[in-house]
Amino acid sequence: MRRYPDAISFAPGAPHPDTYADLDVERCLSRFLDHAVTEWGHSPSTARRLLYEYGPSRGLINALVADLLRRDHGVEAAEQSVVVTVGAQEAMLLVLRVLIRSTDDLLAVADPCYVGVTGAARMLGVETVPVPEGDGGLRVEALRAACHAARREGRRLRICYVAPDFSNPGGNRMGRRDRERLLELAEAEDFLVLEDNVYGFTAAPGDELPSLKALDRNRRVVHLGTFSKVCFPGVRVGYVVADQEVVTPEGDRTLLADHLARLKTMVTVNTPPLSQAVVAGMLLEHGGSLARRCRARSALYRRNLALLLGGLDRLTEQGLPPGIRWNRPAGGFFVRMRLPVPADDALLARSAEAYGVLWTPMAHFHQGPGGTDVLRLSCSYLTPEQITTGVRRLGAFLKGEMGA
Ligand SMILES: Cc1ncc(COP(=O)(O)O)c(C=O)c1O
């Protein structure tokens, strides 16, 4: 992006700066301090010290997070089953490191997949099995086949990572019945589902679907969340709900969350208390629920998505070369577009230099050979004017490079 400062970039999947322009960090901190005094019974000086000292590795604001999950997500999580992490990213790393213990254990991932999880797996030497995703999200029957194939080889699928709501990069969403089928499969084949719920909040009011964790009756789901998109990404606060029971070699019964917290002491020690206090203050300001805040942010993202999709439709009316198609997600940050030519880095460089528009080649998100003729368009970080100009440039690029 820095190489092309005048280009409009449909590449970054970052939250829009307008969504946190109103956040008053000092006010959040003072709300947190009040809470620590009035609800937790600390003296003002002890409360203040909480901000500056090392903190518990499992987190400082777990009760508030558990309360948020109950109010906003229909998830009943005991405070002890929550670990507050440095973004959802750290949670992914901890979960993979704790749960994958043998080279025979495999991680299934939706294909294409968010690079944060595939990158963490690569770093830990965890082998991944790509499972295709369609418009209806992860293909459950393909996952079933992957379980059976692993078993035939004497291995086992231990975890399946999935973002059921408007996945990154595919923009796909699983329907309710498929969510239930996935949980049934997890029970039948004895694996855990690692649910990443980053974009669920972008659904239109009334169009929300229950998270996998809200449907989970058998503790099959380890649930990841983040405040990056609804607070601000630099706050680096996420969480994991890990209510699975683990029996230690000594026969003690513990929670998976305990094991994650123990490992966290070797990774980041604790999530910065200052950041947790900002998030806590924001939660307290909103009476423990972020539903109202999420609705406003969701409206902004859906406005951007509608502008992008409407602009693309107008390009079609003006006549686009054949073989160009895109999906129409109802939420999330991403649209994927199929081209009649390879959407590779060379084409991206041409798009940037000659037409002033950037996007992301989808092949970067695939484990295997898929996605070579697909690109990802993200509209979260742009203003309406930038989207309009960007779509016009995209039209010139498509016609210029793929026209007769
Ligand atoms: C699917 C998905 N999961 C996780 C994250 C990262 O979350 P965090 O900022 O909490 O580490 C992102 C960020 O873009 C994402 O797209």
Image (cartoon, rainbow, N blue to C red):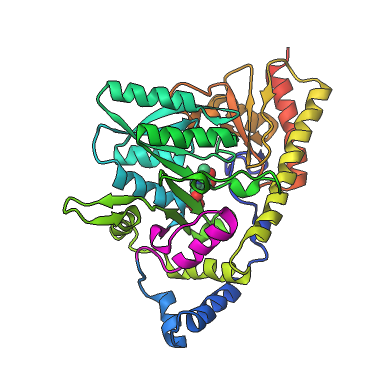
What is the x, y in percent for residue 133? 52, 28
Look at the image and tell me in which quarter the C terminus lies: top right
What is the x, y in percent for residue 200? 59, 46
Look at the image and tell me whether residue 135 can be seen. yes
Q: Which residue is found at the position 49% from the left and 62% from the top?
A: 66
Residue 53, above or below 22: below
Q: Which residue is found at the position 63% from the left and 67% from the top?
A: 23
Q: Which residue is found at the position 33% from the left and 52% from the top?
A: 256
Query: 255 or 398, which lies in front?
Result: 255
Residue 352: in magenta span = no
Q: Which residue is found at the position 57% from the left and 59% from the top?
A: 232
Look at the image and tell me in which quarter the N terminus lies: top right
**Residues drawn in magenta:** 57-84
Residue 76: in magenta span = yes
Residue 120, above or below 394: below
Query: 253 or 348, which lies in front?
Result: 253
Residue 32, above or below 263: below
What is the x, y in percent for residue 340? 63, 16
